Amino acid sequence: MSRRLIAVGLGLALAAAWAPALADQNVQIRHVELDDFPTVAVMVSVQGSAGFGAGEVKVLENDVAVPVTAVRPIGPTDQGVDVVLAVDTSNSMRGAPLRTAFAAAREFVTRIPPWVRVGLLTFADRPQIVQAITSDHEAVLRSLASPPPTAIGTALYDAVVTASGMFTETAQRNIVLLTDGRNTAGVGDLQAAAAAARDAHATIFSVALEGAETDISTLQQLAQLTSGTYASASPDDVGAAYRSLATELSQQYRITYRSRAPYGTQATVRVEVPVGVDEVAFLAPALGSGTSGGTETLTPLRRLFQGPLGLVTTVGLSFLAALGLVSLLLGLQARSSRERQLAVRMAAPPRARATPPPRQERNPLTSWIPQPVVGAAGRVARYTGLAARLDSRLEQAGVSMRPGEFLAGAGLAALVGGLVGGLASRNLLVALLLIAVGGVVPWLLLARAARKRTGQLQAQLPDVLMVIASSMRAGHSFMQALDMVTKEIGEPSASEFVRAVTEIRVGSPVEEALDALAERAGSEDFRWAVMAINIQRKVGGNLAEILETVAETIRERETIRRQVRVLSAEGRLSVAILTVLPFLLAAYLLLVVPSYIQPLFETSIGIVLLGGAGVLMLFGFWWMRRVVRLDV
């Protein structure tokens, strides 16, 4: 009793294990067309279905659902279907088996659509082409009217090689191989036969006529190596096997979808229809390379972004962007040098300092930007109220550039970033990300330059105050003391004090000139020093002593500030890494495995997760900055 229960259990387990595989035999992916990649066309053979529409088809690429753009049956307007019927005519097939095989072949020809082309090959000791591949089904039926004489030997492998060479059209290629024996003649072997079929892009459907000499293993391997199918049938079931093949080759569908796989990577496509499921892997063509399935007619716009021309465009734009950045940096340095020389010349003789240096109408640094673009950016800055703040920020950074020129340069940087990102990745999200990066980078560079210059001014302030105090103790006037600063202190304090002295000498009140100097410096310590000078000029007192006290206080504050920066360096570095790392990781995934991260942008739950992550990240950034920022 227990043995019977065990046997029943094993039988049920085997049935459950084989059930999905048997169900999936109703669907087979025959071919994947990549001629118009990223548009992919999947040819699917279906059995046991009267038809279905696009709403009943589900396509998954790399386990991610993709929208199906079209589903239609393959017909005479498509590339076509070619079939070679290879029938064994050796002595083992003599009599009823051969007559049954030819009758099944005739029924096969009558069942397939007229647009399917058919050829006939027989083989015994050697293969013989009876009918070349033709769309004239009547000619094929005449060739199948009566079986030929049988002969000794079975050249199975040579028959497959010869059948593979019969295809001439660029159509779907199929070989229906029927035999009841094993290879006993010819010069070919299993590897050569399978290689010939694969080189011809032909699929072998092998039918084994049951008998004592049937080489089932070889027939199964030929079908498996060419993505075909194997069937075993008795002489009475050959007709059913051929009818099944005729239905499979006739009921084929072309399913089209838009691929999201990166160029040059392997992808797996899975097709689910009402009667079954099948999947296959394919290799996406490399960017700029042609596909093996045909040629693609490119529009002028797509030709710009693909192939060698796209590579040249990308390299050219990258070179121009790098050249523009280098020119910007070199131009800033040259401009600063010319301004220093001009300031020294104007500060030389007292009578020669009549007017401040005129501001140039057009900055040589940004002369490559079209004037209409600069004018439009300037109007936008004025209308939005950004001009005054941006002009003050540019002065703090020591950049000789108008607000319109800066905004135009930032806009062009965003445009170049978007073009380079779109051409390099062919991904809209990456292009938008690089547009944002290109637009933000100039502002970050400007803020960095302003902070660096403010830090330099603040670091020089104690020395500036000591020079003024020493000059006044030596008997010089306050104006002479300011002029001494321009000669004894280096940049950037020298140029700022040259400007302040020049403004005073052309009629500006001393308090206003010093307040403007403190505003340009952007330093709280500078404001305190200027406030002390202005108060002393109004109420009197020993200015030299006051300045020495202020200088000593500022020097001690700077020492403490540097100690705090050293102690908080690790925390500030952690803030930068934790802020930048998610964006770098997202950009890497978009470039390498976009299908892994795209659900975040295409599903409702993904968008909710992105929004929540953005809010939490902003809060975390604000909190970390609060923790590591210590005011001294």
Image: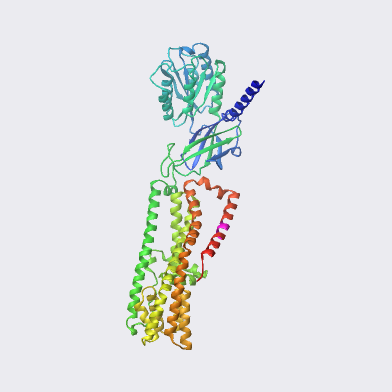
97 over 613 or under it: above or below: above
Q: Main secondary structure of the magenta part?
A: helix
Residue 33 visible? The answer is no
Using residue 345 as the reference point, say whether residue 209 is left or right of it.
Answer: right
Using residue 7 as the reference point, say whether residue 227 is left or right of it.
Answer: left
Pick whichever, 270 or 238, lies toward us: 270
Pick whichever, 551 or 85, lies toward us: 551
- In the image, the segment drawn in magenta is 614-618
Residue 533 image position (x, y, % from top left): 45, 83
Query: Which residue appears at 46% of the width and 88% of the height?
Result: 540
Pick whichever, 106 or 88, lies toward us: 88
Residue 457 visible? The answer is yes
Q: Is residue 616 magenta?
A: yes
Q: Is residue 462 magenta?
A: no
Q: How is the image coloured?
A: rainbow
Residue 57 image position (x, y, % from top left): 58, 37
Q: Quadrant of the N terminus?
A: top right
Outermost residue, bottom side: 540
Outermost residue, right side: 1
Query: Which residue appears at 48% of the width and 78% of the height?
Result: 528
Pick whichever, 575 or 301, lies toward us: 575
492 over 436 or under it: above or below: below
Q: Dividing the picture into quarters, in which one does residue 328 lie?
A: bottom left
198 over 294 or under it: above or below: above
Residue 36 image position (x, y, % from top left): 47, 41
Query: Which residue appears at 54% of the width and 64% of the height?
Result: 627
Q: Dividing the picture into quarters, in which one does residue 399 lie?
A: bottom left
Residue 44 image position (x, y, % from top left): 53, 33
